[in-house]
Image (spheres, grey):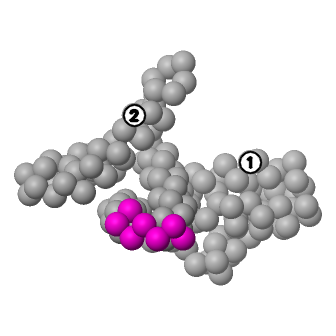
Amino acid sequence: MLRDDIKIALNEAMKAGQARRVSTLRLINAAILARETSGAERITLSDADILDVMGKMVKQREESLGIYEKAGRAELAAQEREEIEIITAYLPKKMSDVDAAHAISALIKEIEAETLKDMGRAMAALKQRFGGRMDFAKAGALVKKLLGG
């Protein structure tokens, strides 16, 4: 399980004295815990949910990286790049836009989605099957287009 891989990596990083890696892995664990305890009941996240959390962390750091670069803050930008690199090491390889389009088309046919009313069901199925490997902002736009939106 992905959670176990992260815990093992955290222990190894602490033993090796890798401060940036330790802090980033702790941030990942904190984000996972925050998501698990955000509702009325504590839940246990699946690997797909953990990948979603980590994907959001990468997007946040990419936004910060752009801000730091525009402001000329090279040291903070370098820190963000390091964190992005550490987090993305645990994410599966992203699908190309062409592969994603084929997967979306096949899934829409498979679940027999026909109208925009089926968009939520299609997006849920995509996230379940391709969590962490697909850009869901682009996927949502394509699903909407294919369903006549």
Q: Is 124 situated above or below 143?
A: above
Whether residue 132 is visible here, answered yes or no, is no
Q: Is residue 147 left or right of residue 84?
A: right
113 or 98, nearer to the observer? 98
The circle on residue 33 is 2
Q: Is 111 situated above or below 97?
A: above
Disc 1: CA contacts within 10 A as few (<14), some (14-19) or many (>=20): few
**Mark 1 or mark 2, whichever is nearer to me:** 2
- Name the secondary structure under disc 1: helix
17 or 139, nearer to the observer? 17
Q: Amino acid at mark 2?
A: Leu
Q: Where residue 67 sits in the image (x, y, percent)? A: 54, 64
Whether residue 33 is visible here, answered yes or no, is yes
Instruction: Find disc 1 in the rendering and name its residue.
Output: 121
Farthest residue to the bottom: give it: 98
Farthest residue to the top: give it: 40
Residue at 60% x, 54% y: name it: 127
Q: Is residue 143 magenta?
A: no
Q: Which residues are magenta?
A: 70-76
Disc 2: CA contacts within 10 A as few (<14), some (14-19) or many (>=20): some
Q: Where residue 76 sits in the image (x, y, percent)? A: 38, 62
Q: Is residue 73 magenta?
A: yes
The circle on residue 139 is none
Tell me how many marks there are.
2
Q: Is 5 situated above or below 88?
A: above
Farthest residue to the left: give it: 15
